[in-house]
Structure formats: structure tokens, C-alpha cells
Image (cartoon, rainbow, N blue to C red):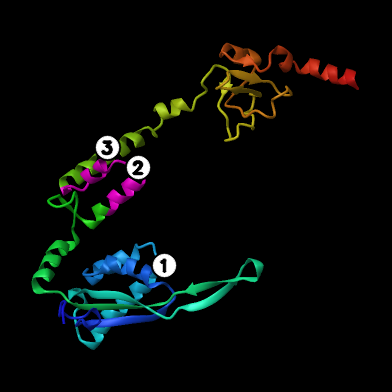
Amino acid sequence: MAGGSGVKTNERPGTRAQARYVRVSAYKAREVLDLIRDLHVSDADQVLAFTDRDVAKVVRKVLASAVANGQNNEQQDPDTLKVVACYADEGPTLKRWRPRARGRATRIRKRTCHITVIVGRMGDDELRRWREKNQAGLTTEGGRGGRRRTPAADRRARVARSRGESTETTETKTVDEGSTSEVTEAEAAVDEAVGSTDEPGTDADEATEAPYAGSHLPVDEDGQEAPEGFEIKGNESSKKFHVPGSRWFDQTNAEVWFATPEDAEAAGFEPAGGEDEQDVASDDAEKDEDK
């Protein structure tokens, strides 16, 4: 008979597992199976774990079943197994009908398939190359010939990329222990400098003092509670001040408090809305006239 006389796919030697009547088309299953063919079982499992297809979950279970069969039934070492063959055969098609216009009907075909995964032992040379590539859990950066880094450094680089940070600063901390110690000493120096500002009589205490003569900083986060003896609200961004009872006094959060309008004007602040809006006595007189 013309053609190759090799072993058929379904007659490949090895340990197999099969899932029958899977409710997915064979075409969709074959797209996922093509990703893991001839891979080591651990590499194939990682590929399936991150494949964004629903059928990948089923294929992953079939792969795990095939590895378990080889380990328990044939006493094979899972670390020496690879996916020798994987294929999907068409199963029976479920036929349904959908009503359409003018009394007609359209056929709906619900495909099924049978998924088979066969695992077998890797060759000695192939197994040796795979172990050299994955020894000590190191990964190669920058492709073939690139420098190697540990999984911890690999995770830090991925986190830095996800945050939009530069990976150079992250990697320089893990090149060797000497650089790590330098970073630690630098961080300790920064912590010491920051801690020194908390001592009494330093710039940190001076920053909490009143910024202007006759003024006081807010005592609460909202700037609504007036300090004792300081009842005029000042807004740093607009350089305006508000006296109690004025038009926008209650709607304003104080960034600085003043004791008198004269102190506010001396600090460069102006009355919000002009003198008329800050004249509480005239506003009260107008309200009395309206009544």
C-alpha cells in the first residue's frame, strides 16, 4: 500500500487518558491540543492553565489523568513524561430545531468530540536538555544567551512592568548581595534622615507654626472648627478671607484662621466678594427691612 507505514496516531505507545462526549466541537479542541503537543507535561500544564479557552480546562484534566495513569499503573516518573500525542475525534452531533419566520425551522447542530492525550517517556538526550534548561528553577532573560535570574527576580520584574515602573531599578537591587546591601544602607540613611525631623526644635515643628502674624492653622481636617480666638476663615489658594456670618462662610473650609480682618489683610488676603459681602451688620439691616 502506498504511503507511510508508520504507527497510526491512535496506536502510539504510551499511557493515555480520554474524555468522551465533550460538548465542544473537535475543531475548537484541536486548536488547544496543538499548543501542548510534544511538550513536557509540566510545561503543557502551564500552557493550559493560561490558555483563554473553555476547552483548555477539560484538556488539562485529561492531561492530569494521563500522567496519573502512567505514575500509578506503569510506575513511571512524572518528571520524565511528555505529551507524545493528543487528538480530538468527532462525536455524535445533537440535532435541535429553532423556529423561524413563515412556519419554517432551522437546524441547530450541537457538536461533541472525544479528546485523547497520550504521554510517554522522553528520550535520554531530550530529557537531559530539558533538565539543563530548567535546572535550579532559573529562567533566561533576553532570549538565547541572555543573563539568568531567579524566579523571585522574575516576579519582581513582572510586578514592575504591570505598575509601569522601570525594571532596571528593580533588577539592580537583586544582581548580587553587595548591591542589595548598598540599597539597604541607603534606605537606612533615608530613614535616619526622616526620623531626625521628628525631634523637637527641628524644621518639622517650625512647619506647624502659624504662617502669618495673627493667624492659626486648622485644628481639624475639614477646617470647620475655629481655634480659640481665631474666627476668620482664610483660603490660601484664592487669598480670600470670610468673617463669621458672611455669605460664603459656612460653605468654606478654612486653610488658615485669622484673629481680625486687619491681620488677614496684612497677610495679603482680600475680603471674599468685596467689603459689602463681608459687612454682616448691613446684611442684617437689609433682612430687617425686608421683613
Q: Which residues are magenta?
A: 155-177
Q: Distance between the Cα atoms at labels 3 and 2?
A: 27 Å
Which residue: 17% across, 49% down? 177
Which residue: 55% across, 22% down? 237
- Amino acid at dot 2: Gly
Pointer 3 or 2: first along the chain: 2
- Is the stretch drawn in magenta largely helix, strand or loop? helix
Between residue 175 and residue 259, name the one nearer to us. Answer: 175
User: Residue 67's image quarter?
Assistant: bottom left
Which residue position holds label 1?
54
Query: Element type at marker 2?
Result: loop
Disc 3 vs disc 2: which is toward the camera? 2
Residue 27 shows in this picture: yes
- Assess disc 1: are there few (<14), some (14-19) or many (≥20) residues with their C-alpha within 10 Å of its C-alpha: few
Pointer 3 or 1: first along the chain: 1
Horizontal and vertical percent for residue 137? 19, 62
Q: Residue furthest bottom?
A: 73
Q: Distance between the Cα atoms at labels 3 and 1?
A: 53 Å
Report the quarter where the N terminus lies.
Answer: bottom left
Which residue position holds label 2?
164
Which residue position holds label 3?
189
Which residue: 89% across, 20% down? 290
Disc 1 vs disc 2: which is toward the camera? 1
- Amino acid at dot 3: Ala
Horizontal and vertical percent for residue 249? 69, 25
Between residue 72 and residue 29, name the one nearer to us. Answer: 29
Q: Is residue 61 above or below residue 194?
A: below
Residue 201 shows in this picture: no
Pointer 1 or 2: first along the chain: 1
